[in-house]
Image (cartoon, rainbow, N blue to C red):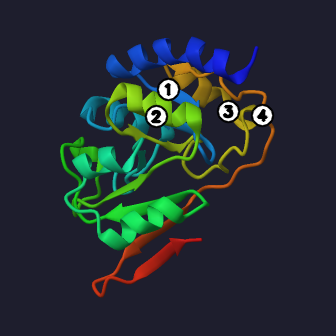
Amino acid sequence: MDAHMVQHYDLEPTLSCLADGGLILYPTDTVWGIGCDATNEEAVEKVFELKKRDRSKPFVLLASSIAMLKKYVKRVHPRIETLLLYHSRPLTIIYEKGVDLAKNATAADGSVAIRIPNDVFCRELIERFGKPLVATSANISGTPFPVHFGQISSSVIMGVDKVVKHRQLDKEMREPSVIARLDREGELVFLRE
């Protein structure tokens, strides 16, 4: 079965799971992630519970495009927009203020970390869903993140409502994204390279 067939076959049930406030396990442009509707507070809470993660550490979110990003953050600095267009490695940016997102999907100060994934399946899923998704590595907090599907623990697999089939056999080792933010002077500061 080619990748396109799998995508199609996977998209509908994944979209309905997200719409019902469920949790998905899906391949992102970096590592496998636990995802949910980033505007649904109850769904986001379930991700914290599954990961046993400290509530003070918010998740990275994924948007499908710069247009979607602009609907969910207060301001996208022109320098960031240029960077997003030309940066080849996965790049997560921390924006000062999230808008219309679940309160627990943003940090205590209202800031939010968002990436536009360079992955066809991921982009199509988010585009079709119409809202950003949570994308946190598919591991329990404090344990190593899985670099491919075969390393995901059964407790994570059993803890989600839908496991995406796309790219399960892909053994390519992937790394988390670079994380950056603009400082007060408008300079880019890398928090994770």
User: Where residue 112 sits in the image (x, y, percent)?
Assistant: 32, 57
What residue sits right under mark 3 in the picture?
153
Residue at image coords 57%, 35%: 120
What residue sits right under mark 1 in the picture?
24
Mark carried by residue 35: 2
Q: What amino acid does circle 3 point to?
A: Ser
State the SS at label 2: strand
For the residues bearing labels 3 and 4, Cβ distance under 8 angstroms: no
Q: Comparing marks 3 and 1, which lies closer to the viewer?
A: 1
Question: Disc 3 and disc 1: Cα gap in Å?
Answer: 14 Å
Question: Disc 4 and disc 1: Cα gap in Å?
Answer: 18 Å
Task: Please state, as top left, top right, bottom left or bottom right, where the C terminus lies in the image.
Answer: bottom right
Query: Is the residue marked by circle 2 packed among few (<14), some (14-19), or many (20+) residues within 10 Å?
Result: many
State the SS at label 3: loop
Foreground: 107 or 122? 122
Q: What amino acid does circle 2 point to?
A: Gly
Q: Is residue 156 left or right of residue 39?
A: right
